[in-house]
Amino acid sequence: MLQRIQSVYLILAAAAMLISVVMPLATFYFNTEAVVFEAMGIYLNGELTDSTWGLFAIGLFSSVVALITIFLYKSRLLQIRLSIFNIVLMVGFYLYFGFIIYKVYPVESLEFSKVGFGIIMPIISIILTILAIRKIGADEALVQSLNRLRG
């Protein structure tokens, strides 16, 4: 189970999504006031102005799905399906992030200061999940070729 490289990829993907949930996603200025965007909320001058618990839930759920996928090593096709679902969740994380920015603050008034470390982590997690899918597919192909030789 944990000896396979795809398990390592999935653990790293889960860790990357957990990091994206706890680290700041972006810092920008809105009418010359500093705004910090995190997965749990938007903070204006250190005070919570808007709750974004949905991003936290998506990131946490994606991390849990990656961890559950590791333990389904006997059903490789289910692992591939759950990994694809997890990639869809991570893309949804970015879409929801963009939706919140456009909904809460007018785009004309936004001035990005810096991109946080947390916003990069889902991309890394997507790449690691794709690598895991490729390795799971290679395992499935190996098992199918051995079944052909036996039967």
Image (tube, rainbow, N blue to C red):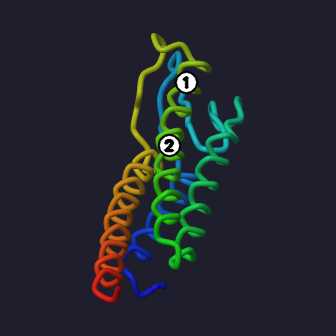
Label 1 crowd (10 A; few <14 / some 14-19 / many >=20)? few
Q: Amino acid at mark 2?
A: Leu
Residue at coordinates 31% horizontally, 80% vertically from top-left? 148
Q: Residue furthest top?
A: 108
* 57 in relation to 96, above or below: below
Q: Earlier in the sequence, mark 2 or mark 1?
A: 2
Percent of width and height locating residue 53: 70, 41
* 65 in relation to 58, above or below: below
Residue at coordinates 54% horizontally, 19% vertically from top-left? 102
| Quarter of the figure with the C terminus | bottom left
In the rendered image, which residue does mark 1 sit on? 33
Q: Amino acid at mark 1?
A: Glu
Horizontal side, residue 145 vs residue 68: left or right:
left
**Relative depth, front residue between 103 and 149:** 149
In the rendered image, which residue does mark 2 sit on? 25
* 40 in relation to 80, above or below: above
**Relative depth, front residue between 65 and 50:** 65
Q: CB of mark 2 within 8 Å of CB of mark 1?
A: no
Q: How many marks?
A: 2
- Element at label 1: strand
Percent of width and height locating residue 32: 50, 20
Residue at coordinates 47% horizontally, 50% vertically from top-left? 118
Q: Which mark is residue 141?
A: none
